Amino acid sequence: MHELSIAQNVLEIISEQCIKSGHTKIDSVNLRIGRASGIMPDALFFAFNAIKTDSLAAEALLNIEEVPVTGLCNDCSHSFIVQEEYILNCPVCKGSSFQITSGRELDIIDMEVS
Ligand SMILES: [Zn+2]
């Protein structure tokens, strides 16, 4: 499961940050995940909650902000947003040549420790 290794990564990073800042408990962590990242938020919640039990984040609340996919059309230069996971073509000219400008992120925005 893809999300399990991501959850482990996130847990490692936030635990390290927590210790570095001299704290012993993680209260919450906020993630930003693009819809084109291939990560399923539900699976990530599940994985995080499953592995957090013996860590500094045992009682941490995970918040996930989903970022829509945005593209820039190479043919008509139109910038557009889609709610789907994948862009198939430009909604204006139906061209299939475009760049994905956001929606692939996996960022730890911030966390609360105590
Ligand atoms: Zn276009």
Image: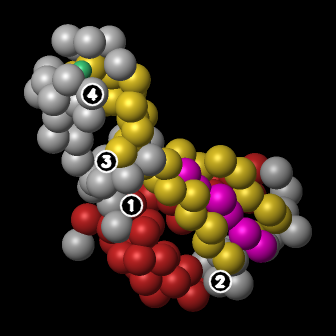
Pointer 2 local density, CA inside 10 Å: few below 14, some 14–19, many at least 20 = some
Helix, strand or loop for disc 1: helix
How far is disc 1 from disc 3 in space, using C-alphas?
15 Å
Pointer 3 local density, CA inside 10 Å: few below 14, some 14–19, many at least 20 = many
- The residue labelled by disc 1 is 6
- The residue labelled by disc 2 is 58
Specify the quadrant that holds the C terminus.
bottom right
Q: Which residues are magenta?
A: 27-32
Residue type at numbered disc 4: Val
**Rendered position, 9 above or below 40:** above
Marks 3 and 2: CB-CB under 8 Å?
A: no
Pointer 4 local density, CA inside 10 Å: few below 14, some 14–19, many at least 20 = few
**Foreground residue among 61 and 68:** 68
**Rendered position, 49 above or below 80:** below
Front tag of 3 and 4: 4
Q: Which mark is residue 92?
A: 4
Query: Mark 3 vs mark 2: which is more N-terminal?
Result: 3
Query: Mark 1 vs mark 2: which is more N-terminal?
Result: 1
Pointer 1 local density, CA inside 10 Å: few below 14, some 14–19, many at least 20 = some
Residue placed at 23% from the left, 72% from the top?
A: 1
How far is disc 2 from disc 4 in space, using C-alphas?
47 Å
Query: Mark 1 vs mark 4: which is more N-terminal?
Result: 1
Residue type at numbered disc 3: Ala
Residue placed at 80% from the left, 62% from the top?
A: 112
Residue type at numbered disc 1: Ile
Figure quadrant, ligand 1: top left
Q: Which mark is residue 36?
A: 3
